[in-house]
Image (tube, rainbow, N blue to C red):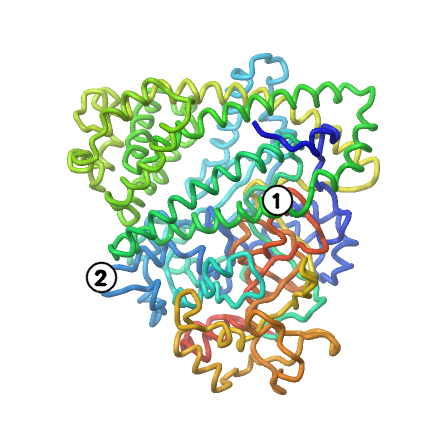
Amino acid sequence: MPTRKLWQVLTPLALLTTLPLHADEGQWLPHQLLELESQLKQRRIEIPAQQLADLTKPPMNAVVGLGYCTASFVSPQGLVVTNHHCAYGAIQYNSHGEHNYMEDGFLAKDQAHELSAGPQERLYITDKVEDVTTQVLEGSEQLESGYERYQLIERNRKAVIQGCEADPAYRCSVRDFHGGLKYYLLRQLVIRDVRLVYAPPESVGAYGGDIDNFEYPRHSGDFTFLRAYVAKDGSPAPYSEDNVPYQPAGYLNINAEGVRAGDGVLVAGYPGRTSRHKLTEELVFSADWLYPTQAARYQGRIDAIDALSATTPEVAVAYAATKASYANRMKKLNGLLDGFRKTDIPALKVSRDRAFDQYLQGKPEAQALSHLRQLVAESQSDYQSSFYLNNAQSGALLSAASSLYKWAKEQEKADAERDAGYQERDRKLFAARLDRLERRFDARMDQVLWQQDIDAYLAQNQRDPVLDAQLAKLDFDTLYVKTTLGDKDQRRAWMDKPAAEFEQSSDPLIQMAVALYPGNEARSKARKAHLGELSKARPQLMQAMLDWYQSQGRPVYPDANGTLRISIGHVDGYQAADALYKQPFTRLEGIREKHTGIEPFNAPAKVLAAIDEHRFGQYARPNLTAPQEQAWYCGFLPCAQADAQPFGSVPVNFLSSADTTGGNSGSPVMNGKGELVGLNFDSTYESITKDWYFNPAITRAVHVDIRYVLWMMSEVDNAQWLLEELTLVQ
């Protein structure tokens, strides 16, 4: 594994930012807000910390998860607002035949004309978070074997989950925090009937496309409205014409006045993963091998999708969401790499590392650090050896076959002994994943993408004889014709078949899945054993770190792990590396200035007409920063003060210092009263490294200004019936 000479001389632990040295750093668990009263007051947040910590009270009872993004209720009739890119799958699902809602946008005439978002869409409403560390770790301290420890913790987790899911309306999970030092139970009500209500066209929702992704100034209308439906008795149910809108316990009022520079904001949501507590060695591995390797793979897949889409429109539609996901991940990875080149993050932490090393001297945890470093090195080596092997099995139908065969094998065990994801509680979600292929798969495209991964596997020396033999037998000329897995009903039917029937099947992909199963399971067992070792080693070090910070009177937030968090920030611009000050707001005129008529700068004619005619309605605002500052961005450059219209303009996007990451897409941005003022949708390019290190000078989140959303609804798309459903306050 390559390393960097500068980092070889650094102290062994890069304790990346773990405490609020700066007021706006931190992705806090709701109950931790009780420790942050002074921080809330500093940002003029009026909602009491006690109320923010209560998931049954506003505003937190209005915040919901999508499983990969965040959303929020904005009406008593189950209306939900999130990002356009978060709802892209739902828009794509309904784009077929004469309807291309990705290109044209969609607005239901009324509730009766709202469209199903698809069988896989869910809304998750967290109503309970409980510390279950004692139950999960019970009996584990006596175990020396990593595999036995892993298995015991998993059994304990499942027992806790089983007790929580006595009510079938709820989905429960147990998440580890601080590397397994703490475990919390999360209970979530699951809404299974989600419908598409209003989505602007892609030329609004993704204005600027990949060119503007992670850049600023931005002019993106990245918003979409969905609605939650339930059975008439109020219980969650799959899609049915008889279902009625869900009535949430709380919803957000919308402040039509929005925010000004300096205003305090709250961002609540489900941030995915951060690595601020990871070792220096883990950062080096990511920067030198993992991120470049992943980015290169994504670029190859994007290029392949673009090439076939250019001549095959149905491929463009089927793989639109897939391509968008690849492009977002790839640009983030490249941004991380660029950030690592520009900013020596470990060097920034040396003084803190040395202080912690001194704290550890003479303590048993110093030995724990050495052991943890050894385990991390082993896990990195294992990941490298399996990366290409796993990718060489990436064909969509082979993946389905492998999952189905494992499902059949797991059904031979008692439910409590099955691997997570293969228990009876997972049946509906498992089936939904199989169904998702129906509109996201094309055999021609799948072959090209799979062949790329096969070629990459064959070009390196970490080989597996069984996989080699299976790949040698692949015949793409007949494979997709001979397999039955391309048919939705056939795929579903395999869920109810025993393993013996798989083993006797003549389907080439079923045969391949059966042959690869023993090796995949052996590697899975080895990974579990290693995770069991890490679950013992990492918490020892994390406890020492928490004790160190506690001795200084400083609370510590855990790394993000997809659980509900709250960030505190304020509306603010920043000084970019080129000395250009990035203003906090952009305005409508910037859409016109960027417009070329060519994707991704192809604003709809009706948007341009409204801008040219100055039809700004009640959402026009004068400058929103101090008079001596330039408050606006037009296109790529700040607007000259003299060029600003005397009656102002409509804000489009704005910046804040809130601490966010992937998964916060769609998160409600709230003012100090808990009223909706925007939607989080991106970060600036300079901020991408915040997954490892929060730099308060340049870390900024990018939000859709709620005034732009309201302007689109009132002045462009005539969504009056929907506007009337919202509660607007001044």
Q: Position of residue 418 (x, y in %)?
A: 40, 24
Q: Residue drawn at (76%, 54%), measured in percent from left and top?
A: 39
Classify 273 as above or below 637: above
Residue 519 lies in what quarter of the image? Answer: top left
- Element assignment for label 2: loop
Residue 230 lies in what quarter of the image? Answer: bottom left
Q: Nearer the viewer, residue 611 or 528?
A: 611
Residue 181 seen from this side: yes
Q: Amino acid at mark 2?
A: Gly
Q: Residue drawn at (52%, 68%), measured in percent from left and top?
A: 219
Dot 1 crowding, Cα within 10 Å, few <14, some 14–19, many 20+: many
Q: Quadrant of the C terminus?
A: bottom right
Residue 691 lies in what quarter of the image? Answer: top right
Q: Amino acid at mark 1?
A: Asp
Q: Position of residue 342 (x, y in %)?
A: 66, 48
Q: Position of residue 222 (x, y in %)?
A: 48, 63
Q: Which residue does the numbered mark 1 point to in the structure image?
A: 691
**Image check: 530 left or right of 46?**
left
Q: Nearer the viewer, residue 693 or 657?
A: 693
Q: Which residue does the numbered mark 2 point to in the structure image?
A: 97
